[in-house]
Image (spheres, helix red, strand yellow):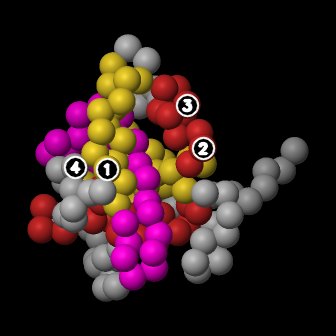
Amino acid sequence: MTARPEPFFSWTARRVELRESESTDLVLDELVPLGTGTARLIAARDEDDDVDYLALVVGDVADGRDVAVRVVEEETLLIEGGRSCASPEILIGLTATPNICGCSSARHVESQLCVDGPIRTMIASVGVRSVVVDWYHPTSTVA
């Protein structure tokens, strides 16, 4: 994997520019009913690590810029998509179990988006030009 310089970041979010050449073949690309509209359920397989990645694309993201990316538990992907008030939005479904690198799911997605990883290529496959991902996740709040 190769880190890429990104032209924008803030204290809590980072913009990731994508190119069409980064796209990959999806193992799943289905339209699913979601509330009053539809969404795309997509999946890609990382052959190197034998891992599947699942995402729900809410709204039209073709040629979209600064599309929000959010991590949710895989089991609640469709429920969270139905609750989504931001459109377009891409929800990445990850399991609650620790991943390969031992880091949190949100950090894993950020890392995959900032380098040439399977999540980045899966998202590029739907035609989005740039995404914004939150990279600040407080571990606890002070009461």
- Residue under label 1, please give it: 28
The CA distance from mark 3 to mark 1 is 19 Å
Q: Are marks 2 and 4 in contact (CB under 8 Å)?
A: no
Q: Which mark is residue 79?
A: 3
Query: x%, y% of residue 11?
Result: 50, 60
Residue for point 55% across, 67% down: 107
Q: Which mark is residue 126?
A: 4
- Residue under label 2, please give it: 75
The CA distance from mark 4 to mark 1 is 12 Å
Instruction: Name the N-terminal-most of marks 4 and 3.
Output: 3
Question: Quick check: can you spot residue 88?
Answer: no
Residue for point 34% across, 85% down: 1
At label 4, the amino acid type is Val
Where, quadrant-wise, is the C terminus in this rendering? top right
Residue for point 60% across, 71% down: 99
Secondary element type, mark 1 = strand
Q: Residue furthest top?
A: 36
At label 1, the amino acid type is Leu
Q: Are marks 3 and 1 in contact (CB under 8 Å)?
A: no
At label 3, the amino acid type is Ile
Give the class, few, some or many, for how many residues have Cα within 10 Å of label 4's Cα (few <14, many ≥20): many
Instruction: Name the N-terminal-most of marks 2 and 1.
Output: 1
Instruction: Name the N-terminal-most of marks 2 and 4.
Output: 2
Magenta highlight range? 45-67
Query: x%, y% of residue 112?
Result: 41, 70
